[in-house]
Image: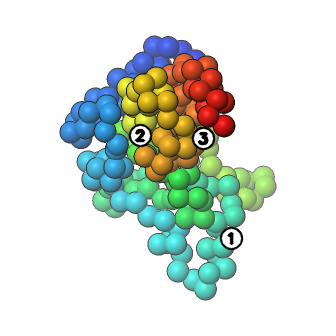
Amino acid sequence: MAYRRGDYQHKWRIERTAAATRERLGLDQLEVLDPNLLVEDLDARVFHLSDLITDDGVALRRARRIAFDGASSFHPETSQPVIILNCGRPVRRRMATLMEELAHLLLEHTPSLIARDPKLGIVRRSFNREQEDEAYDLGAALLLPKERIQRDVREDALTAGEIADAHKCSEQLVMYRIRRMRLWNRYSGYARDAS
């Protein structure tokens, strides 16, 4: 069944999957997740482009400029999960990317295919919007659980920046979760008053 972001059955399935995964890791819904717990649980290896490109620096500088945040797949010989992150992205953006790539592994998504376009001669990858949306939403829910966002907004009236600092992620990811939890009106009301 294709994932549809606007379908509430899909939304709550993601929330339940995130809660069950956190419980398996020994975390409740209010604790801050250290992504390394999930990396270890999945027996994954995480690399940055700088780990893989060891030339004089020209190739690494070029790689950092490309439209690439990260990827996950399996080692061809050992089948161990492998995640590659673009070290040229801001640290807090890399957190969202890491969580998304971990979610791809949890959801057992089919990795993108990378191949040379026969007409253009350039390397391209396949793209599955439903898988990308589903992985992004699960990664966000794992890092910023519904109960934690509800508490931070409803009870503690924290700003997106304060929530982002606690979870070492971007304010944009926090605001996305606030909107997904239908708390935007409450949040924007007190956030506007605070500024």
Q: How far apart, in angstroms, are the residues tagged by discs 1 and 3?
A: 26 Å
Q: Earlier in the sequence, mark 2 or mark 1?
A: 1
Q: Which mark is residue 177?
A: none
**Front residue of 62 and 184:** 184
Q: How far apart, in angstroms, are the residues tagged by discs 2 and 3?
A: 13 Å
- Residue at point 25% right, 38% down? 27
Mark 1, other Cα within 10 Å: few <14 / some 14–19 / many ≥20: few
Q: Earlier in the sequence, mark 1 or mark 3?
A: 1
Residue type at tag 1: Arg
- Residue at point 43% right, 36% down? 144
**Front residue of 73 and 172:** 172
Question: Vertical placement of 111 versus 18: above or below?
Answer: below
Residue type at tag 2: Leu
Q: Which residue is mark 3?
A: 172
The percent coordinates of residue 26 (x first, y second) are 21, 39
| Residue 93 is at least partly visible in this image | yes
| Residue at the extreme right | 120
Residue type at tag 3: Gln
Q: Which residue is mark 1?
A: 62
2 or 1: mark nearer the eye: 2
Mark 3, other Cα within 10 Å: few <14 / some 14–19 / many ≥20: some
Tag 2, which secondary structure?
A: helix
Q: Which residue is mark 2?
A: 143
Tag 3, which secondary structure?
A: helix
The percent coordinates of residue 137 (x first, y second) are 50, 32
Q: How far apart, in angstroms, are the residues tagged by discs 2 and 1?
A: 30 Å
